[in-house]
Amino acid sequence: MKNILILGGDGYLGWPTAMYLSSKNYKVTVVDNYFRRNICKEKNIESLLSNPDLIQRSNLWYKLTGKEIKVSIGDLTEISFMDSLFNGKIKLDWGNNNSFDLPDTVIHFAEQPSAPFSMIDSEKSNFTLINNVISTNNLINSIKKFNIKAHIIKLGTMGEYGTPNIDIEEGWLNVEHNNRKQKFLYPRQASSIYHTSKIMDTDLLWFAVRTWKIKVTDLMQGPVYGIFTKQTELNENLSTIFNYDEIFGTVINRFLTQAVIGYPLTIYGKGNQTRGYININDSIKCIELAIQNEPKNGELRIFNQISETLSVNQIAAKIVDCCKTIGISAQTSNKINPRVENEDHYYNPKYQALKDLGFKPSLFNEEIIIKMINEILKYKKNINESAIFNGVKW
């Protein structure tokens, strides 16, 4: 099976993806610098569940399954560390076998993932830009330098597109101008410094594809929700990071946690803001489809990775209705929108390509909602109500 290198392997998506691929007999190595868990601890917005570090979790995974997830801890904005992942000089912090096979696929999750965090102040904005853009630039330069033929799978975001008043195509737009035609990257219009950094990532990758014939899949993913996968359910200490705060918690995860403790679901503005959403299990399956369906050398393939579109009001209504069926009284509360965004807008993204490869989306329905609520209820005592709303404005 292929050798998989996951950058950002300690994250909400990185760790469950590592376990899922390891369970499928891929050879997996994860890299991280613990930025997210350190910031969460510093700001007292820690995960709902206890999360041992990567070395501890990889050791537990090995004991439970006999499968190895190798670990290397380091900062990917340092070019010497990035180079070590591709020149055979990697320092493994965990792994029973000291050997390291160069990757066939690199999954790049290693970025500061929060729009609110990027808008707190100039220091956080600068960190977001430096961390996200430099890590991507280091990645493409190391692959070029050592002539690695690996397929890069980069986690982009649907937020790159913004909310244009036309249909959102899958990454590309055919333009006719003065009787001439050409295909261009679909116009981007970010709504935060974080989303702007992701646009820069896409531009860097497109440069590397055109210039150095690197092969890349860029996944324009919507907000992810979910608390468990088949692998995390093996043992509580294999759980992924589950944030419910305003900074790192996505809206569905946050609303469900609020409902459990009777905290009104905080709807910003009118609540008509519409986005594309995807369950964590669907996200992982899409990543595997990207691994199995490599682009050609010199090709940038872009997928819009979502399962459905929902407005904030629709999400809140679904949660409130489901809570009633299990005896929980959930309410909503509209707050003055702290964000600069369109609250009434057209939103029609195309997301057919992954379905054509076999992706079968699961929808945000009563079964999923109730299962998530019941899981969150187990850890109700861990919920820090003061972490939910921080009042980040932009």
Image (tube, rainbow, N blue to C red):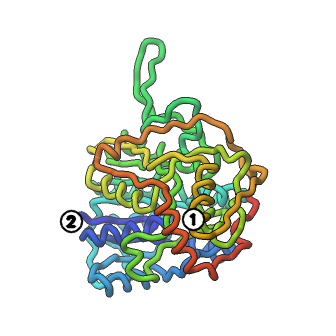
| Image x and y of residue 251, in percent | 60, 58
**Residue 205 left/right relative to 342:** left
Tell me the quarter of the picture where residue 376 sits. bottom right
Q: Amino acid at mark 1?
A: Thr
Query: How many numbered tags mark residues here?
Result: 2
Q: Residue furthest top?
A: 179
Q: Amino acid at mark 2?
A: Met
**What residue appears at the point 55 percent right and 47 percent down from the top-left corner?**
310
Q: Provide the residue designation for mark 2.
A: 1
Does residue 190 lie above or below 97 as drawn?
above
Mark yes or no: residue 80 visible: no
| Image x and y of residue 348, in percent | 51, 36
Whichever of labels 1 and 2 marks the residue nearer the N terminus, that label is 2
**Residue 90 left/right relative to 280:** left
Q: Nearer the viewer, residue 355 or 294?
A: 355
**What residue appears at the point 77 percent right and 54 percent down from the top-left corner?**
335
Q: Provide the residue designation for mark 1.
A: 325
Q: Callout 2 environment at 10 Å: few (<14), some (14 to 19), or many (20+)? A: few
Q: Are marks 1 and 2 in contact (CB under 8 Å)?
A: no
Identify the disc placed on residue 360: none
- Distance, label 1 to label 2, CA atoms, is 45 Å
In what element is the residue under mark 2?
A: loop
| Image x and y of residue 99, in percent | 26, 77
Q: Callout 1 environment at 10 Å: few (<14), some (14 to 19), or many (20+)? A: few
**What residue appears at the point 26 percent right and 44 percent down from the top-left corner?**
296
